Image: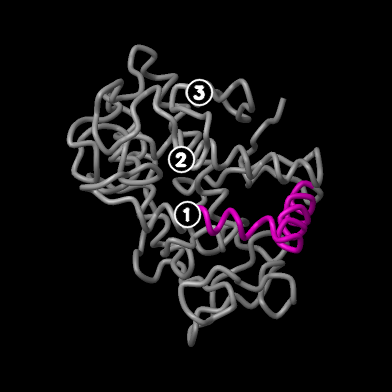
């Protein structure tokens, strides 16, 4: 059984194995297919039209499946690798170990945002961006520039306390747990972290920054935490809803995956703390 660990608890060897597996997926061209998939969905998901990966109830099961496929790709390279998660409510500064040269690398330089250290620096020759939002081929970050503070533990707890998964109109105007976690309403958790990191993380091509996977692994953990806290609540809507994915509807781009299939993460992995 795969166990996803807090990135702050990873050993030096676990960090190295994760980084090496990511770099191998990049070298083989597999990594960029994940970037392309995410970018195409975030550009097509709209509040008034068909929405699958974002601004909709299926935000959480869609990304759970997306992360699972990425984790399985990593494990095809190195079976010991699991996706770590970044608890940004605790590791919330630009000096956190996450940003060390042996793992994600640090902030971008002031003049153009280019990340200059770590395994994903363009200067290292192993991380050229091919799915681009502009002509620049290098990873960019602007930590704590557009948003000063990451979400707090109290803000996370306030969202976890919401007992209803989602509500009409099932988009970025919705009340309920999903939308407050996604960040279109309320204290803004998920979206705020993307903007706090900045650079590619603030675009549809956000998986160009490998910290995307650690961020979303924590979002997935928070969903698992919510499921444990509210065993009587489940995915909504269940049936007959236009433009969104109901409980047993198929989620694009997969031909045989529904939100219902993704409710129990323990069939695939667990977390290093109760979830």
- Find the distance from the CA under tag 3 to the CA under tag 1: 33 Å
Q: Position of residue 244 (x, y in %)?
A: 30, 36
Within 10 Å of disc 2 (Cα), the crowding (few <14, some 14-19, many 20+) is: some
Residue 92: assigned label: 1
Earlier along the polypeptide chain: callout 3 or callout 2?
2
Q: Residue at x 47, y 70 (%)?
A: 199
Q: Residue furthest bottom?
A: 111
Near-viewer residue (45 or 113): 45
User: Taking 240 as reference, is 242 above or below it?
Assistant: below
Q: Which residue is mark 3?
A: 261
Within 10 Å of disc 1 (Cα), the crowding (few <14, some 14-19, many 20+) is: some
Q: Quadrant of the N terminus?
A: top right
Near-viewer residue (209 or 40): 40
Q: Residue at x 67, y 68 (%)?
A: 120
Position of residue 66 in the picture relative to residue 17 (left or right): left
Q: Position of residue 170 (x, y in %)?
A: 23, 36
Residues in magenta? Answer: 14-38
Q: Which residue is mark 2?
A: 252
């Amino acid at each position: 059984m795969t166990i996803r660990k807090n990135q702050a608890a990873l050993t030096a060897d676990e960090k190295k194995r994760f980084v090496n597996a990511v770099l191998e997926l990049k070298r083989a061209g597999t990594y960029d297919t994940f970037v392309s998939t995410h970018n195409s969905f975030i550009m097509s998901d709209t509040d008034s039209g068909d929405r699958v990966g974002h601004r909709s109830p299926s935000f959480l099961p869609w990304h759970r499946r997306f992360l699972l496929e990425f984790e399985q790709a990593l494990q095809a390279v190195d079976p010991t690798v699991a996706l770590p998660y970044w608890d940004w409510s605790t590791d919330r500064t630009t000096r956190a170990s996450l940003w060390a040269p042996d793992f994600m690398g640090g902030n971008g330089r002031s003049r153009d945002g280019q990340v200059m250290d770590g395994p994903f620096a363009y200067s290292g020759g192993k991380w050229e961006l091919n799915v681009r939002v502009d002509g620049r081929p290098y990873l960019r970050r602007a930590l704590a520039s557009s948003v000063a503070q990451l979400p707090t533990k109290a803000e996370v707890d306030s969202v976890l306390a919401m007992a209803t998964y989602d509500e009409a109109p099932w988009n970025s105007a919705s009340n309920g747990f999903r939308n407050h976690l996604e960040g279109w309403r309320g204290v803004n958790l998920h979206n705020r972290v993307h903007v706090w990191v900045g650079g590619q993380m603030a675009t549809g091509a956000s998986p160009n920054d490998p910290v995307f996977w650690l961020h979303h692994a924590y979002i997935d953990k928070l969903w698992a935490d919510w499921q444990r806290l509210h065993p009587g609540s489940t995915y909504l809507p269940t049936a007959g809803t236009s433009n969104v994915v109901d409980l047993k509807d198929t989620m694009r781009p997969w031909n045989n995956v529904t939100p219902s299939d993704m409710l129990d993460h323990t069939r695939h992995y667990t977390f290093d703390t109760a979830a």
